[in-house]
Amino acid sequence: MKKKETKVVIFGDYDTGKTTTLEQLCDRITKVEYNGTTVALDYGNCMVGGEKIHLFATPGHERFKFMLEIISHGLDAAVIVVDNSRGVTLAEKEIMTELEEKNIPYVVFSNKQDLDDSELEIDREVEVIPTVATEGTGLMKGLEILLEKLN
């Protein structure tokens, strides 16, 4: 019997911690090797409860904005990484709106809690998980919450 595979795309503005989130989920939390950065996306995979999770992190730079649609094709769920010290940006709000319009489940990682541990102000009904990507804090919990939304 083939194991289920899930595509999760990690979105967020520039310098929010998307790549670090992906690296931590692949390398340190689930002990599966991170496959490195390419020019316009990051990719890695991990096993969670016998399920292979393909993780793609989108580029935050404006010049790679065209890649969002390409990377997003066929996604099952999404993580939006927000720099808690900056708050939710317009670009992140637009991504949330698009995911909601397409009925794609997502969670928000309120990242960089080590720099600013205030509660993230967000104008939506969405699960917000406090994270510190550099330490791996909250990441696995957030991924598990997201995967539960798929069942």
Image (cartoon, rainbow, N blue to C red):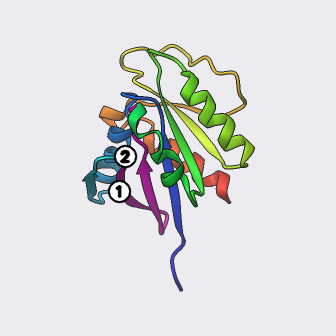
Residue at x 52%, y 82% (from the top left corner): 2
* Residue 127 seen in this snapshot: no
Element marked by disc 2:
helix
The disc label shown at residue 22, or none: 2
Q: CA distance from mark 2 to mark 1?
A: 7 Å
Residue at point 71%, 49% (across, down): 102
**In which quadrant of the rendered view does residue 128 lie?**
top right
Q: Main secondary structure of the magenta part?
A: strand
Q: Are marks 2 and 1 in contact (CB under 8 Å)?
A: yes
Q: Position of residue 121 (x, y in %)?
A: 61, 17
State the extent of the magenta-drawn residues as a range: 41-61
Q: For the point 68% across and 60% down, which residue is it?
A: 151
- The tag earlier along the polypeptide, 2 or 1, is 2
Residue type beneath disc 1: Gly
Residue 14 picture location, percent across and down: 39, 29
Type of amino acid under label 2: Leu
Say which residue label 1 marks.
44
Q: How would you rate the neighbour count of disc 2 (Cα within 10 Å): few for under 14, some for 14-19, many for 20 or more?
A: many
- Viewport quadrant of the N terminus: bottom right
Question: The residue tagged with tag 1: helix, strand or loop?
Answer: strand
Q: Is residue 54 inside the magenta stretch?
A: yes
Left/right placement of residue 130 relative to residue 114 reads right
Q: Residue at (42%, 21%) from the top-left corner? A: 113
